[in-house]
Image (spheres, coloured by chain):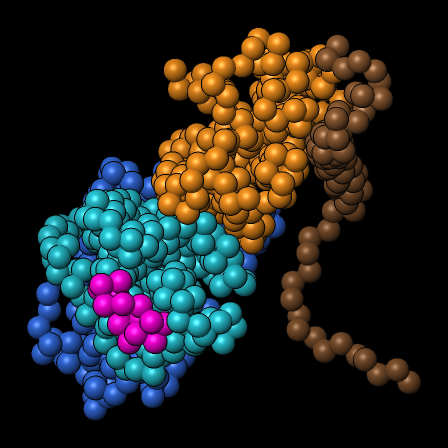
Amino acid sequence: MNAEARPAVRLASSSVGALAAMKGVFARDMKVAFRQRQDLLNPLLFFIMVVTLFPLGVSPEVSFLSEAGAGILWVAALLSVLLSLDHLFRHDFDDGTLEQLVLQPQPLFLLILAKTVAHWMLTGLPLVVLTPVLGVMVHLDGNSIAILCLTLLIGTPVLSLIGAIGAALTLGLRSAGVLLSLLIIPLYIPVLIFGTGTVAAAAEGAPVGAYLALMGAFLMLALTLAPFAAAAALRISLSNG
Amino acid sequence: MAFDSFSAFLTMEGHGPYVWACYAVFFVLLAAMMYWSLRARKTAMDACRRGYEFEADKSKVAAPAPAASFARVNVSQD
Amino acid sequence: MWQIFHKLGSPKWFFGISTRFMPWLLVGGIMLLLAGAVWGLAFAPKDYLQGNSYRIIYIHVPAAFLAQSVYIMMASAAIVTLVWRMKLADVFVKAVAPVGLVLTFLALFTGAVWGKPTWGTWWIWDARLTSMLILLFLYGGVIALDRAINDEKSAARAVAVLVLVGVVNIPIIKYSVEWWNTLHQPATFKLTEKPSMPAEMWVPLLLSVLGLYLVFGWLACVRMQTEILSREQRTRWVKEFVMKGRV
Amino acid sequence: MPEPLLQAVNLQCERDKRILFRELSFSILPGTVTRVEGPNGSGKTTLLRMLAGLNDAWTGELKWCGSPVANQREAFLRNMLYIGHRPGIKPLLTPMENLRALMAGRRSVPDAVFRQALQGTGLTGFEDVPCRNLSAGQQRRVSLARLLIADEPLWLLDEVFTAIDADGIAALESLLQQRAAEGGAVLVTTHHDLALPGMHKLILGAGGVSDER
């Protein structure tokens, strides 16, 4: 066969924009989640149950609860996010869609960012919405509840973003769930400290603007760095699998 | 010397047990870590040596791995 | 340039050079460490505030100092692993992580024991002790991840990512823990912060810090050699070293 | 001689201290079908994953249209289609939704085209049924529907004939041949007895090469 007989190869040069690709990832994750609505309730139920344990296990007294309430809610929220992280990449990894995600001609960290945003909308955001109800149940006053919601609103995306790194690192390992907690909890400590500290400061009547700004800085830092680390970790885990 | 007598050195005005316990744990753990590390290296060397000797043995009777036949294995014991 | 870099990263080269230096590291390290300890225990003057319990400083500070700088060293090696894929760098991270864990534990243990005569309690949620505890968790995570991944190349790179994420977090953790500490309790006097230390006090401290550095160097060499032996078993030079005892 | 699409120079891959292959060099020319052959454990899947960029535990050089893949990752990915062991299909989504999600990061394709592709793979009537209600072969067909609309010149297909019936296999074979005639390049691994006229072969040795370096 001579060369002229072959049709020339046509190389595709343009793909869709990164934003459209991110939208596609986000829309797919949302659709999958809503096909299994009952699973969306799990972190919320877990959140409520952990909070319930404290009045039962420590003390139902108003003075204790109103003092410790913000911390209890923050720890419970942190644990529920942690619980949901294992699923962030696992199902995609098992059915092969994660390979196809990595092979999209797009910057991987942006796709991971889209996935993380979807994860936050499905776990972190509902927790924030539920917080006022639980805040009333642990006798927090109105101002504290408002500040608490605000700190959770800024803090839970950070939890999802840092968690994505851990989920990517432990992908495909046995006992990945426990390992994930071991890796991620130390990294969650600053967010927890500032989240509860802000509420405590507000309860003492101190201005909280600076603390909220600092938490916002955490969020910005996590938004810029975490997707890169998660993308690197994901490539390593896929290479292994 | 910061102490008047050897017994004062040991008791350190009541702080002796804390100080000596710290030093003991520190040096014991450090020594243990050094010992373990040395032993691990020796184990690794031995494993290598065994590997080479096994290889040397095997090369004398180098036979290609047989192809899979999927023949049933007779397990009857009569 | 690249040739030199490559040579520096070659396990064979490392094996030769480290075998030559190790006796010096070991002897020097132990001598310095013992000199620092004897001087600190018997000859340094008593602290007017804390009495003799402060003598724990001569092992607490070296352990705490090393524990933190080992993590920084691991982070530097992690960058080298990820960017240049130098074999020695990930051998280093894998080899020294358990040493870092033990040193962190020692810093915590000596800190706690020191706390008993000073504060009257074994454990206090002091900023330094708390961030040491978190450092212990970070080391634990690194070791757990390394053990969980079978393939050693993937393990090295995954651990490198984790160490780097951790090192970005360390200043944040330190800062937040200090802030949290001031929020919950008024600052009492700190264990190791002295307005001014007379030379008879800090010279032995310097000796023991240096000594522990050298002992750490020796430990790192031994453990890296162990790791290299099992990784490079199939190369000719390892075979020669194992069978004939020289590189 | 046309310029090779993909060129591999001195590939070496080691897995769990075992060298799968080394000094492996080959070129993939446009207009060819190449079958990767070798016994179980010889590294066929690993090779394909390496070429696709999923596995990076290897040394050597990979060139796309003459320059290293690493320098033009996105351009390479845009022109490469990989279908692996795992079909990449979400069981909770319908075939239509799956195809949409798979193509979302590549190019925009109207729904009518997806429907046509699904019909082409024999899934008429199943377009909007969740994939978990489909059989293994049908799920495989969903991912193969991408081949009917692919504009990527390089296809890497790992065991794609698995769970496909005899008629389907025959149709797929002619699809691969047609693609090659159009100027595409196809790399397949299969245990099915694939024999296309003019097919190239890439033979990997038995695993366990572990002599001295």
Region rendered in magenta: A131-146
The chain that appears cyan in the image is A
Specify the principal SS of the magenta part.
Answer: helix
Colour chain B appears in: brown
Palette colour of chain C: orange
Q: What is the tally of numbered marks visible in this picture?
A: 0
In the picture, measured across the screen, residue C87 lies left or right of residue C246, that is left
Asked if one can make out residue C232 in the rendered structure from this viewpoint, the answer is no
- What is the x, y in percent for residue B50? 78, 40
Quadrant of the drawing holding the C terminus of chain D: top right
Q: Which chain is blue?
A: D
Q: Position of residue B36 (x, y in %)?
A: 74, 36
Residue at image coords 49%, 76%? A56
The answer to whether residue C113 is seen in the rendering is: yes
- Magenta segment: does it hold A133? yes
Residue that appears at 72% across and 19% down: C41
> From the image, which quarter does the N terminus of chain D lie in?
top left
